[in-house]
Amino acid sequence: QVQLVESGGGLVQAGGSLRLSCVRSGRTFSSYDMGWFRQAPGKEREFVAAISWSGSTTYYADSVKGRFTISRDNAKNTVYLQMNSLKPDDTAEYYCATASSGFRGDNKRSRVDYWGQGTQVTVSS
């Protein structure tokens, strides 16, 4: 059984920064691509960022490119999302996810095997 536990969400002013963390337990962490998605009230869950199992390849939604950075520490079974220059539009519940088949290509949401419980990020204007 795989478990994903996110932390690091909170309330921040526009222009500020937050770092989300996701610890994975269960099957070998280093063999799986990891990603972050978010869901704002009344909207569908959308892809934010993903990283390959080796950390050599990253993917970002256009809306966060240049502001967010995804990274992983396989020794700690942890994936991070550093979020800088936050905007009110970034307000959402952020979910960690894992994909055994990888996140390369379209329809990244359909590739998810497991979801975390989510952590709330609120950006005030």
Image (cartoon, rainbow, N blue to C red):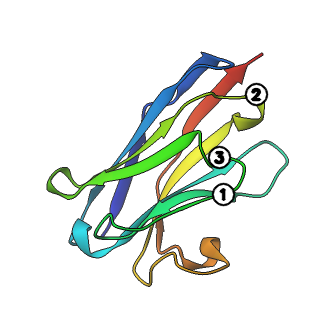
List the single residue furthest toward the left: 75
Q: Position of residue 88 (x, y in %)?
A: 76, 27
Tag 1 residue: 61
Are the residues at dot 3 and dot 1 in contact (C-beta closer than 8 Å)? Answer: yes
Identify the image quadrant of residue 3.
Answer: bottom left
Q: Secondary structure at mark 2?
A: helix
Are the residues at dot 2 and dot 1 in contact (C-beta closer than 8 Å)? Answer: no
Q: Position of residue 117 (x, y in %)?
A: 50, 49
- Circle 2 packing at 10 Å, graded few (<14), some (14-19), many (20+), is some
Q: Secondary structure at mark 3?
A: loop
Position above or below: 36 against 105:
above
Tag 2 residue: 88
**Between residues 36 and 86, which one lies in front from this camera angle?**
86
**Between residues 85 and 80, which one lies in front from this camera angle?**
85
Q: State the quadrant of the N terminus.
A: bottom left
Identify the image quadrant of residue 102.
Answer: bottom left
Distance (Cα) linking label 2 and label 3: 13 Å
What type is the residue that disc 1 sits on?
Ala
Distance (Cα) linking label 3 and label 1: 6 Å
Tag 3 residue: 64
List the single residue furthest toward the right: 42
Residue at the (59%, 39%) spot, across then down: 67
Sequence order check, earlier mark of 2 and 3: 3
Q: Nearer the viewer, mark 2 or mark 3?
A: 3
Q: Position of residue 46 (x, y in %)?
A: 70, 58
